[in-house]
Image (cartoon, rainbow, N blue to C red):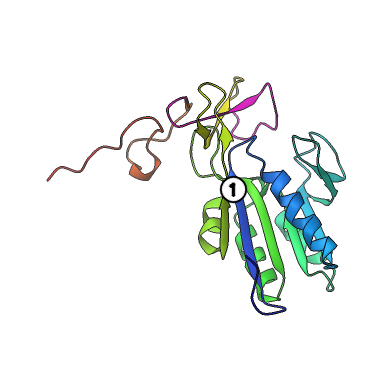
Amino acid sequence: MNPTRPGAGWIEVIAGPMFSGKSEELIRLLKRAAIARQRVQVFKPKLDNRYSDGDIVSHSMMRIPCEMVERTDEILPRLDPRTEVVGIDEAQFFDETLPGVCGHLANLGKRVIVAGLDMDFRGVPFGPMPTLLAVAEEVHKIHAICTSCGAPAAYTQRLIQSDELVVVGAAGAYEARCRRCHEPEGAPPASEPWLFSPGEPAEEESS
């Protein structure tokens, strides 16, 4: 779906676990916009340099040129006023001001397409993604395939030991899992009921 009026602002979010094809879908949408002769500008965080320092690259090796930024506040100063479509990959690595920047871009009449992990390896909502999912006009929630049982996978399983929340990696460091097969580490306290551990039922309220 696209805005019905020319020049109307719009935010789309592509969310899911690792290996679900988020970057591939982002690249596909941006290339379609380019084919439609729309001016496209793409950003990703410098933190993500797994495959390239100058392109967004999917696990299937699809790619599109991008600009690398360290912080959210670098996006607006680099924006070409003629840009019609703005793509942002790995949104979970940006700070909490990203939704405000995306909203500002949409208010300027830009189509903003954002891709990112909706949950971290523990199954906890990741960075600015929950807010982006709430304010977006359209959300593409996509799934991977669970490497343990073959079911649709919505979770990311970390395979390496680390106390750090952010550990950039790909195959060998992470894999996709379904709710039943996901084994979260460092799960949040039970006092936050909306963050119950995947695979376990939430406690029922006593009457």
Look at the picture and state if 194 lies above or below 106. Answer: above
* Nearer-the-camera pick, 126 or 189: 126
* Nearer-the-camera pick, 203 or 146: 146
* Nearer-the-camera pick, 71 or 84: 84
* Magenta stretch bounds: 163-181
**Residue that mark 1 sits on:** 15
Where residue 42 sits in the image (x, y, percent)? 80, 56
Magenta highlight on residue 186: no
Q: Name the residue at 56% across, 56% down.
A: 139
Look at the picture and state if 100 lies above or below 145. Answer: below
Look at the picture and state if 101 lies above or below 158. Answer: below
- Is 72 situated left or right of 1 in this image? right
Magenta highlight on residue 173: yes
Where residue 90 sits in the image (x, y, percent)? 69, 46
Whether residue 97 is visible, yes or no, is no
Where residue 103 sits in the image (x, y, percent)? 63, 68
Where residue 61 sits in the image (x, y, percent)? 81, 36
Secondary structure mostly seen in magenta is loop
The three-letter amino acid code for the residue at tag 1 is: Ala
